[in-house]
Amino acid sequence: MKLGVLLMNTGTADEPTVEAIARYLGEFLMDPAIISAPYFIRKPLVQHICKTRPKRTVDNYREFWTPEGSPFMIASKAQATHLQETLRLRGETGARVVLAMRYGNPSIAAGLEELQQAGCDTVVLLPCYPMQVNACAGTCLKEARAQIAKLGKRGWKPRVVDVPSFYDQPAWREALIEAVQTAWTYTPGSKFLVSCHSTLLADIEAGDPYRDQVEATRDFLAEALGIPEQDALTCYQSRFDNRKWLQPLTEPTVVALAEQGVRDICVVCPIFTAENTETAIEVDRDLRATFMEHAGEGARFTYVRALNDAPGLIGALADAVQDALAGQAPDVLTTGLGADTNVPRPVSEHCPAHK
């Protein structure tokens, strides 16, 4: 067996400029999985958004960027490198791990072509989101399957295995617990918030397991950290529009806590495995400022950074790959090329992590 792993995430602009952000945003929003309106409606709407939104967000990108590039992309590349090393050390000789982004570069199509050229006859599709959410893992898997079908017409027909989530991997859980313990210590009266990107409530009602998996994450963290049930909360950030989204929303929750007299909160965003502008700007900068403004002098806001390329995360990804190959992961979908893949249905519209 020649193993290939396609490690996928949402993506980012190529550089922190209005033009690059517009290109990235245009590709993102033109995906029917994101805006489900007919093409003749979607196209002018996206063109309008791409003329205005990049100008409003470019400063955030510039603040987040470093001389070496996007910290999100740097961390994502390190994840792929270390995952390949780990799989090879575990006996998957010649395993090839390729990084791909659902939107922007490097693309899913390019990543799969690289695995084809490397002679891989088994491919694991691994979205780098611990929880299974249609708007993230679902659309990554759907696009990857579509590109594999195209390559199949050129004779490449590998065994394909999907990994929709890995939130139940012990190594990931241990790494997340350690990250929180390193950053913050619970004391009576403080609050612990597990804040994840929101998604449409209609998708949850249709069977998306996202909310259940987020709440399961909150529960294992609270138990491990000795946090009483009433002080461990879940909330959701970055609502895109006025439709019904998964709630409670993070910012109003933080304001309400401050107004109730809470002076110490900790926020962790476990859906994200790499730092991005949603976490660094919307949470660590803006949410911090909101809480401190309402809580007053002496308040404390702790943000737990994403795991990035922490050994625990890399170990969990390797475990997820090997469990999937062995058929041991309960959420794994294993299908042959051209079969009905049962890929989770993407939501009709989703606001990306603006990495």
Image (cartoon, helix red, strand yellow):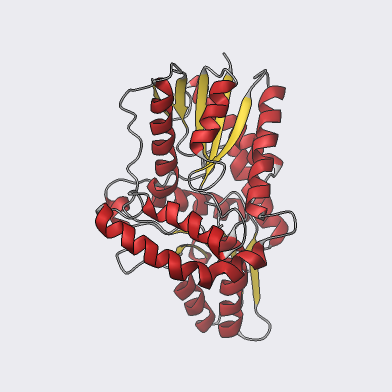
Q: Position of residue 334 (x, y in %)?
A: 41, 24
Q: Residue furthest bottom?
A: 297
Quadrant hosting residue 63? bottom right
| Number of marks in the rendered image | 0
For image coordinates 47% across by 69% down, the residue present is 53
Q: Position of residue 184 (x, y in %)?
A: 68, 63
Residue at 62 percent of width and 67 percent of height = 284
Q: Where residue 321 appears, x then y in whole percent?
A: 55, 28
Placement of 163 over or under 284, stated as above or below: above
Q: Relative to residue 36, is residue 178 drawn left or right?
A: right
Q: Residue furthest right?
A: 67
Of residues 39 and 97, the one drawn nearer to the viewer in this rendering = 39
Quick check: can you spot residue 190?
Answer: no
State left or right for residue 202 relative to residue 298.
left
Q: Quadrant of the C terminus?
A: bottom right
Which one is in front, 242 or 168?
242
Quadrant of the image occupied by residue 19: bottom right
